[in-house]
Image (tube, grey):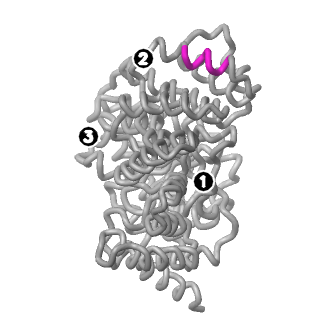
Amino acid sequence: MSHETRLSATEAIPPRLVVLLVAAVAFLAAALPAAAQSLIRDAEIERTLQRIAYPLFRAAAVSPTSVRIYIVNDPEPNAFVAGGSNIFVNTGLLTELGSMDEVQAVIAHELGHLTGGHQVTRGESLAGAKVFGILGMIGAAAATVAGSPEAGIAIAAGSSQAATRNLLAHTRAEEAAADQSGLRYLAAAGAEPDAMLRVLQHFRGQDAMLGGYNVDAYAQSHPLWTERIALIEDRVAKLPKGTTPAPEDDYWYRRMVAKLDAFLGSPATTLRAYPESDTGEPARLARAVAWHRRPDPAKAGAAIDALIAIRPDDPWYNELKGQFLLETGKAAPAAAAYARAAELAPNEPLVLAGLGRALLNEESRDATAEARDVLARAQSLDRVGDPGMLRDLALAEARLGHDGAAALATAERFSLGGAWRDTARNAQRAADLLPYGSPGWQRAQDLVTISTRALKSSRKP
């Protein structure tokens, strides 16, 4: 859970398109100002959002595996689509909304943009650099946050706010269409269509705050809140009333919000918001994280052990225990906790990455060899690409004397961040050291080609 990840430009994209994509992102990186937003990776939260979205995907006849939901570390309550079938949801929206069905309403609206092809038409009407600006939130790598208090929810550096706002510009017609499609998906999924109305009513004051359509590029293209509310009120009145969220779904929603609050807010704020008089499980989770970040290892350890006692087969509580122990310098117990989490979630790359890091911190050859195997499996399972995981894999390979494999992992890590000179240098070293024609050698050659073309593109006026 303490690892930064990004969408690898090589995942499920044809090789020729990979070269074009990374070259465009590299070109844009030189022109854009400093990053203003970031991505968060957390296995439990990602699973929760997929759980919330699953009935909507079915209602929209969209394969759940074809859409990925990303979490943006931004306090502004917002959500958007970009870069194909990707939905981005800001942390500010997740923590400000008041219920699970309101989060469903937001996802349904964004799904309406996806199924309506709005991100495609928007990409055609905007300059290519604007499109690749938001893709940089997926393709650029993160600065390492391991060891920081916020490491439990991994934070990755992203693209500029200016590029994001340009890409987010929908036409008013698209917004209205997405509202109507979203309502249809909510109704078909048996959810509460009224939730979309509640979301808009919650933010309707932004009309006055924004001062009309001439202030912000994103707000400029949205219908006024009052207009949207009137249209949705009329539509909701004609739709059947949905059912309230199932208790288990609501539990995971409240747990997600508590975890976000605890990792993104200060410990003092968290402890005020979740006082010890609140004995609910989400509140106990929030306090455990706050005590860990304070730091108060004794209280945090007791709190997470109590939660594991309630749910011994919960991989995320065991993963969190591993993080607490690792960040307090207890590598062997941390590895044991991560191993239990991996046993419960054997195909979760972020959990495996945590186990690999804990094993590396044991600093024995046997543990390093095991770490290398675990990290290699994590890399093979991860659809996104994790710079921290790749860094740890490179370290394990280097300790074992596998210099070619270490150079390849390092090249992969630099490629995620668009550091093309470092990518080319390490990829060439890997190609020189790895057996000719082997899969690793072939991948190194690909990275040499990609980085060389990206560097050439960045030099063009």
Give the quadrant of residue 28. Answer: bottom right
Q: Residue at x 48, y 17 (%)?
A: 308
- At numbered mark 2, what does the secondary structure look like: helix, strand or loop? loop
Mark 3 residue type: Ala
| SS state under label 3 | helix
| Dot placed on the residue nearer the N-terminal end, 3 or 1 | 1
- C-alpha distance separating marks 3 and 1: 30 Å
Q: Which residues are magenta?
A: 299-305
| Picture quadrant where residue 231 is located | top left
Whether label 2 touches label 3, CB < 8 Å: no
- Tell which of 375 and 68 is nearer to you: 375
Query: In the picture shown, does residue 455 fall above or below 228?
Result: below
Q: Earlier in the sequence, mark 1 or mark 2?
A: 1
- Label 2 and label 3: CA atoms lie apart by 34 Å
Q: Quadrant of the C terminus?
A: bottom right
**Residue on which the image places disc 2:** 312
Task: Give the Cα separation between the discs numbered 1 and 2.
Answer: 33 Å
Query: Tag on residue 59?
Result: 3
Q: Main secondary structure of the magenta part?
A: helix
